Amino acid sequence: MSEYQYYEFLAIDRPLTSDEQGQLRSLSTRARITATSFTNEYQWGDFRGDPRRMVERYYDAHLYLTNWGTHQVILRLPKGQLPLRALEPYCVDECVEAWTTKTHLVLDLRSEDEGGDWDEDAEDSLGAIAGVRAELAAGDHRALYLAWLSAIGAWALQDDDEEAYRAAVEPPVPAGLDRLTAPQRALADFLRVDADLLAIAAQASPPAPAPRERPGKKEPAPLIAALPAKEKDDLLLRLALDDEPQLGAELVRRLRGEPSAATVPGRRSAAELLDAARVRVTDRGQHA
């Protein structure tokens, strides 16, 4: 087999209508299309669709995999759940990109390694990775930092512009990098985040805060009563339209206050992180 490409899309917040599935069928006669998924494989030829546009219009998560080393994940979140400005410090050309549509924020994460080993289990990763969407919406930015680490790890493989590594300062460091969740671990594996580089990065990461319990019936009552009438009407209208599966979680965040993203300012350069990771590898080899 000289060439292999794998495409998978998931509709998580809203299933696709029959008409929408018909529109997607025009892009591929062989794809497996359901109300919640689109999957296809290519061993010759190319997919006629544009994955970015498909995510913008139909899907909440996408995975693309090739046997020449491309690993790509695209995630879509409702626009109010994660501000674009929060992502910008983590963006790296062609590796971590983000943009907004009228209704959503889209995050494109990519890892390239032409010399990397083929991972037979990578095709099954999207279901696990998709959980990152809810974590990002809740203010957990560890997935963004992992994508940034993947990008500078790719720089190290190229080894062609040390000055750029020294000029690039790490973005805000999220809490809990030493204790990744299952979706974050799946994303780190798929994006080929180096374990030694992650261990070095985690040295500056504060402990993860304890998860907040879901509020009981009595806690939100006075908070809801204090909401302005116009805001209540807006929330009830959105609830009646039933187009926003995450509306309940958004309401809880608004009532209890937006969670502060547990991060500390990034102080190290990409070069410092990469150099420290190399030293860690060398030290481990000497003590083996």
Image (spheres, rainbow, N blue to C red):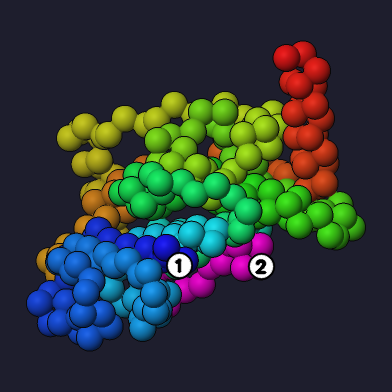
Whether residue 74 appears in this view of the structure is no
Q: In the rendered structure, which amino acid carries the disc numbered 1?
A: Glu
Where is mark 1, residue-wise?
A: 3
For image coordinates 33% across by 48% down, the residue present is 124
Image coordinates for residue 135, horizontal then vertical, percent: 41, 45
Q: In the rendered structure, which amino acid carries the disc numbered 2?
A: Asp
For image coordinates 32% across by 66% down, the residue present is 41
- Asked whether 68 or 209 is in front, the reply is 68
- Residue range highlighted in magenta: 92-105
Q: Residues within 10 Å of mark 2 (few under 14, many from 20)?
A: few
Does dot 1 land on a helix, a strand or a loop?
loop
Image coordinates for residue 178, horizontal then vertical, percent: 57, 28
Question: In the rendered structure, are the residues bearing label 1 and label 2 in contact, judged by CB atoms less than 8 Å apart?
Answer: no
Q: Is residue 272 magenta?
A: no
Horizontally, is 236 left or right of 50 in the view?
A: left
- Label 1 – label 2 distance at C-alpha: 26 Å
The residue at the far right in this view is 163
- Asked whether 12 or 218 is in front, the reply is 12
- Asked whether 202 or 162 is in front, the reply is 162
Image coordinates for residue 37, horizontal then vertical, percent: 22, 63
Residue 93 — which label? 2
Image coordinates for residue 106, horizontal then vertical, percent: 45, 67
